[in-house]
């Protein structure tokens, strides 16, 4: 049997202890990190920052992208989206398909109005989106010789939406 030198034995023992302690700290850190991630899951009252792109399936050119901040459960966003993101954490992504009823609602023909053409801005044409003094948006549906039809429905009313989102930040109450 080979006899170990005392300094070498101490060194090996120290190395073994450091390895054991490092493994214990790593284990504790990953447990702590896991509980931090658990605390960052979206719950009622969470302040959430997300990035999203909303589009109409099969349509080109209708794409809305933005970063939004809201409080979960305050109905500041579509309720169907609020339901889908419960439990998500920062960095997670999700694709949500919304029916017209879950987004901007059905198109309502009673929200169309015929107005004298001269009430529109000069050069207004079909497809232009206008804003009145109260901040209401309206889409010019058509312009005739003397009259124009404007539609006060949201431009996405009556259309399904696909929302691709990514949770950027979660602050829990």
Image (spheres, rainbow, N blue to C red):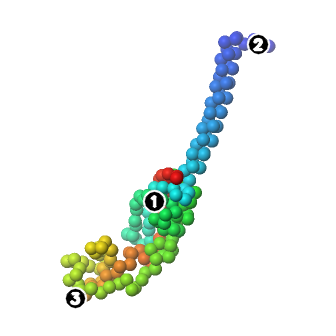
Disc 1 residue crowd, few under 14, some 14–19, many 20+, Cα 10 Å: some
Q: Are marks 3 and 1 in contact (CB under 8 Å)?
A: no
Residue 2 - label: 2
User: Circle 1 sits on which residue?
Assistant: 70
Which one is in front in this view, the residue at disc 3 or the one at disc 1? 1
Residue ID at (47%, 53%): 168
Q: Nearer the viewer, residue 50 or 43?
A: 43
Label 1 SS: strand
Q: What's the CA distance linking mark 3 and mark 1?
A: 44 Å
Question: Mark 3 vs mark 1: which is more N-terminal?
Answer: 1
Q: Position of residue 69 (x, y in %)?
A: 43, 58
Residue 58 can be seen in this image: no
Disc 2 residue crowd, few under 14, some 14–19, many 20+, Cα 10 Å: few
Residue ID at (60%, 38%): 29
Q: What's the CA distance linking mark 2 and mark 1?
A: 70 Å
Disc 3 residue crowd, few under 14, some 14–19, many 20+, Cα 10 Å: few
């Amino acid at each position: 049997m080979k006899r170990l030198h005392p300094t070498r034995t101490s060194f090996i023992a120290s190395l073994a202890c450091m390895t054991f302690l490092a493994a214990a700290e790593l284990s504790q850190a990953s447990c702590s990190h896991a509980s931090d991630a658990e605390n960052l899951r979206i719950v009622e009252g969470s302040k959430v920052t997300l990035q999203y792109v909303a589009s109409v399936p099969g349509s080109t050119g209708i794409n809305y992208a933005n970063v939004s901040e809201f409080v979960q459960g305050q109905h500041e966003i579509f309720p169907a989206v609020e339901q889908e993101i419960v439990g998500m954490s920062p960095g997670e992504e999700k694709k949500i398909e919304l029916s017209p009823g879950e987004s901007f609602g059905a198109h309502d023909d009673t929200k169309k109005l015929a107005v004298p053409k001269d009430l529109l801005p000069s050069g207004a044409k079909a497809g232009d989106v206008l804003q009145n003094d109260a901040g209401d948006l309206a889409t010019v549906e058509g312009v005739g010789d003397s009259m124009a039809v404007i539609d006060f429905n949201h431009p996405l009313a009556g259309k399904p939406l696909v929302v691709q989102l990514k949770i950027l930040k979660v602050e829990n109450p």
